Image: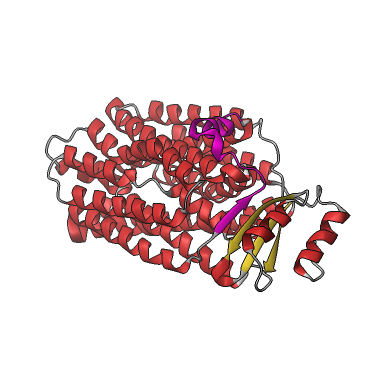
Amino acid sequence: MMNALERRSTFALSSIFALRMLGLFMIIPVFAVEGTSYQYATPALIGFAVGVYGLSQAILQIPFSLWADRFSRKPLIIFGLLLFALGGAVAAMSHTIYGVIIGRAIAGAGAVSAVVMALLADVTREEQRTKAMAIMGMSIGLSFVVAFSIGPWLTGLLGISGLFWVTTVMGLLAIFMLLLVPKTTRHHQKHNFDQGYLKQLKSVLKMADLNRLHFSVFSLHLLLTAMFIYVPSQLIEYGQIPLAKHGFVYLPLLLIGVLFAFPSIIVAEKYRKMRGIFLTAITGVILGLLVLVFGFTSKYILLLGLGLFFVAFNVMEALLPSWLSKAAPIQSKATAMGVNASAQFLGAFCGGTLGGQLLTLHQTAIGWSILLLIAVVWLVISFGLKQPRYLSSLVLTLPPEQDTNVLTQHILAVKGVEEVVVMAQQNVAYVKLDKRVLTDDGRQYLTQLFGKDLAI
């Protein structure tokens, strides 16, 4: 059961993620059609405008995350959200497709997704981590539901420039949510900060399972972005559904996906079946695309294929952050999440660019087949994943009038303890440990430090 601090922090950080993603996602289902109104617009440039935020995100996620492992995470998040808001304003005031591309690139430069995830990992216990990360994943899924439902409606009401102004407002609102998150101080068993940024990054890039997770998030968001450049025109042509009503298509499909995601997360965590659920979700993506290859000309087959994709997508969005938080090295947690976020947004960039190119093919079955092939390669690569390890957490009240730094050094000296996160204002510390490594002597020593029996 989450405690009050975890609930408040999870709500705030998930809201930051959702508000930011809401601003980004509202553009996706309408821009392939509405983007043609901009001067100099072509299908390729429209796809590039949708995906370019992913390119700047991909480039800057890793620098932001390297800094976040060494410095306070909150100021970095604020700076990134200000860039996001500025980019929305630039796009809103633009009259050419090139201006929109510049605005989207600036918005993407606020590359703090990994920093937000790392901060959430700091303020939640290991036993509640999957739940917290699942809630964050669900917030992304919910932002899809809302964005794809109201995006077409808001475009009709405010125009495409008004939609960009809404993204600016979303970014500014997200800054205020950060006030609900407690200030944290992190203490680690291992310190790699003296080896330089490049060695720190290389140590993360050498981990095979992390690289498989990075490829997974790249593939997922490539397919998602390409699909929403590619599918609106098909809903209009084959489904006879006007753009303004596309939200009524996406809403029920995404809600069904969210309903499937919750039990999947419970099974994955409670029964430690994360790998099996993960591979099943990729198979669901493949089945959805296979249906679209052969049935896109039928309105209801087209909707069936989209539904299968959305179910699998929501499960994956919930699983990936949780698995990554378990697999990432504690002392380089933000760095690993930064590489993952870079892969995610690079996938969005490639998906936007690919989707624009698919529009020029005028061979719909070939387009869906290309996306299907990418999903099959993803499944093959993911078979090498191993089940993640599971740590435990203790929530401890700090003893009065004791030097926190000295206390944390004593705790970290215990074999099996990997990290201590201190929230001094709340007088609380989270001790993250591996019960399989912790010895009886270690348990007794921790009991002596805190003057009471600990449930380990």
Is 205 part of what is drawn in magenta?
yes
| Residue 348 seen in render | no
In the picture, measured across the screen, residue 83 lies left or right of residue 198, that is: left
Q: In the image, residue 232 lies at what x, y percent?
A: 32, 43
Q: In this rendering, is residue 99 above or below 44?
A: below
Residue at left 65%, top 72%?
A: 401
Choose between 435 and 374: the one closer to the eye. Answer: 435
Look at the image and tell me whether residue 40 can be seen: yes
Give residue 97's position: percent from left, percent from top: 17, 39
Q: Nearer the viewer, residue 135 or 242?
A: 135
* Residue at image coords 49%, 31%: 198
Q: Quadrant of the N terminus?
A: bottom right
Q: Position of residue 268 (x, y in %)?
A: 68, 50
316 horizontally vs 363: left or right: right
Which residue is farthest right? 440
Residue under the point 28% across and 56% down: 167
Quarter of the image that includes the C terminus: bottom right
Q: Which residues are magenta?
A: 185-206
The quadrant in which residue 216 appears is top right
Q: Nearer the viewer, residue 233 or 144?
A: 144
Query: Residue 194's image quarter?
Result: top right
